[in-house]
Amino acid sequence: MQGERVEAKEGLLMSEPEFKKIIIFGVGLIGGSFALALRKINAVGEVVGFGRRIETLEQAKQLGIIDRIGSDYAELNDADIVLLATPVGQMGELMARIAPHLGQHTLVTDGGSTKGDVVAAARANMGDRLAQFIPAHPIAGAEKTGPEAALPDLYVGKKVVLTSMPENSPEAVARIRKAWELCGAKVSELTPQQHDEVFAAVSHLPHLLSFALVHDLAQRDNRDLLLSFAASGFRDFTRIAASSPEMWRDICLANRDALLRELRQYADELYVLHQALEQSDACKLDEVFTEARKVRSNWSPQ
Amino acid sequence: MQGERVEAKEGLLMSEPEFKKIIIFGVGLIGGSFALALRKINAVGEVVGFGRRIETLEQAKQLGIIDRIGSDYAELNDADIVLLATPVGQMGELMARIAPHLGQHTLVTDGGSTKGDVVAAARANMGDRLAQFIPAHPIAGAEKTGPEAALPDLYVGKKVVLTSMPENSPEAVARIRKAWELCGAKVSELTPQQHDEVFAAVSHLPHLLSFALVHDLAQRDNRDLLLSFAASGFRDFTRIAASSPEMWRDICLANRDALLRELRQYADELYVLHQALEQSDACKLDEVFTEARKVRSNWSPQ
């Protein structure tokens, strides 16, 4: 750590910025919150925003997320960190465009929800800058998107998973870890494959199931009647069905193989419940529900 | 309405109780909250609790849910309302036991989550008191159970569905409607069959799916790793998997046919998504997710 820490009213406040310059590609929920978190504790000297839509960048500037809008990739040369917070599907192309402009000490990280595909994109597009890319997944989903959804404390207490590659130096990984920790996150590490298997099970599958339920009901002639009687159980079960369709389409496709395995295993589970129900097998239902309740009751988000 | 209303600090307060005596079978979340709600506004003179476990009844008395513990079915003769708030599976037997003791003006209602089976149980067990039974389903689920979970405002703004039978007089239905409205609920009416079809879709199926997901993950060797990375999406999706296994086993069995139809339709929906994913059909995924998001975003619990 370069800057000194002083305790301020709102917690950690740095007397000198840890990072002189940070560049954010995609100034929405993930990228914007990263910038706001580091700005809040004076951990960054300057934040420059890049993106495809000038309106979004202007909005981010007005909201105090970025200091200015970048227009020249020469900017990348003296940046400490470049955060790729675009949809995962755009990252490969973006990497190819930025790699030639990165300075020797510039590190790149990302906010993508899948990691196997991002690592593959990096290997295909980062060229001799590959070692400077440290893949990350901040676990801070929300249905809302865009700069106005960004929050300085979005990452406080949340998990960020780094899936570093053999090419990454320990120092580079430590520096990216530090950046996420300064945002308030708890950082852990998995391999890209482990990451994608874990999140297929605990995140991607539930999203698919939730979208599927709402879509199923939405097709019915009596959908308004049905929805008028839906209550808090339905509300919570389907909250994630209000997530970004584009983002989740990309995530599902990016993590297709692991998600297909999860979906098949879940279908097997439903088949067992269908059989139990068809045979009015109270014991089997009891067994499944009791085990589920026990595990769910003992679990809380960490 | 018999008693006069006066507006008190906490809203409606009756100068004279609407109901002289109410009897609650099952003094847990549903029955206890009904009693607390009516007591809070002075709508009931006396609340008597019946149940299978004396400890639970003692606890309800200590919590101010009931005035006293009932021990003699002769009590039923001068009660205004008897609420059956036991598990649905016990209601038939209970009806057979209480029916001979009901006074001519005593009305019976229930808090069961399924209605076709409760109506069938009433037809089989209420004898010549059938017309005095007005089936009801208060939509106020919660994972918590027991007297300590009961709240005076549990029903405020919540829906209660009455599924009256041709035998019920309009006056009897109106009086039970009034009782639930005094609890703060918004009362609507469906036929028992409509009710069970609606709730199979918007409540029973989501519960089954949520239990199934947690049970599926709970079987894995790496379940601790998986659960350590589960976040807010998983938390909300699986909140209802912490519900009472006994209650949901009974609900699933009681509404078996409608639930099996829903489960099959949902499996068809998952099959479509499986095919789309296997074929990397981005358009299909987009279409399903976009429609789901639109419908879910425009919906809120009423």
Image: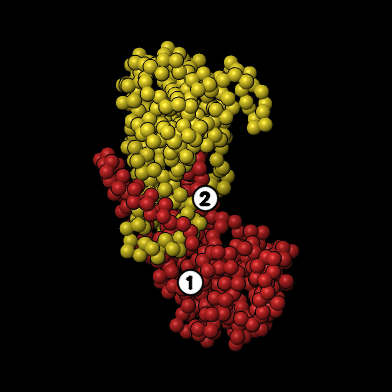
Chain colours: A red, B yellow
Q: Residue at x 49, y 62 (%)?
A: A302
Q: Quadrant of the N terminus of chain A?
A: bottom right
Residue A145: x percent and y percent?
Answer: 60, 59
SS class, disc 1 = strand
Between the C-alphas of marks 2 and 1, the distance is 27 Å
Parent chain of label 2:
A
Question: Hey, which quadrant is residue A43 in on the image?
Answer: bottom right
Q: Is residue B48 visible?
A: yes
Q: Residues within 10 Å of mark 1 (few under 14, many from 20)?
A: some
Q: Residue at x 56, y 35 (%)?
A: B153
Q: Residue at x 35, y 65 (%)?
A: B222
Closer to us: B67 or B153: B67
Question: Hey, which quadrant is residue B129 in on the image?
Answer: top left
Closer to us: A241 or A231: A231
Q: Residues within 10 Å of mark 2 (few under 14, many from 20)?
A: many
Q: Residue at x 43, y 38 (%)?
A: B146
Of circles 2 and 1, the one toward us is 1
N-terminal label among 2 and 1:
1
Q: Residue furthest top?
A: B104
Quick check: B179 left or right of A78?
left
Residue A154's place in the image compared with B251, above or below, is below
**Residue at mark 2 shares a chain with residue at mark 1:** yes
Quick check: A184 left or right of B189?
right
Q: Is residue B112 visible?
A: no
Question: Hey, which quadrant is residue B245 in on the image?
Answer: top left
The disc label shown at residue A239, or none: 2
Residue kind at label 1, given as amino acid type: Ser
Residue A28's place in the image compared with B238, above or below, is below
Closer to us: A278 or B82: B82
Residue B20: x percent and y percent?
Answer: 51, 18
Q: Mark 1 = which residue?
A: A188
Quick check: B61 left or right of B130?
right
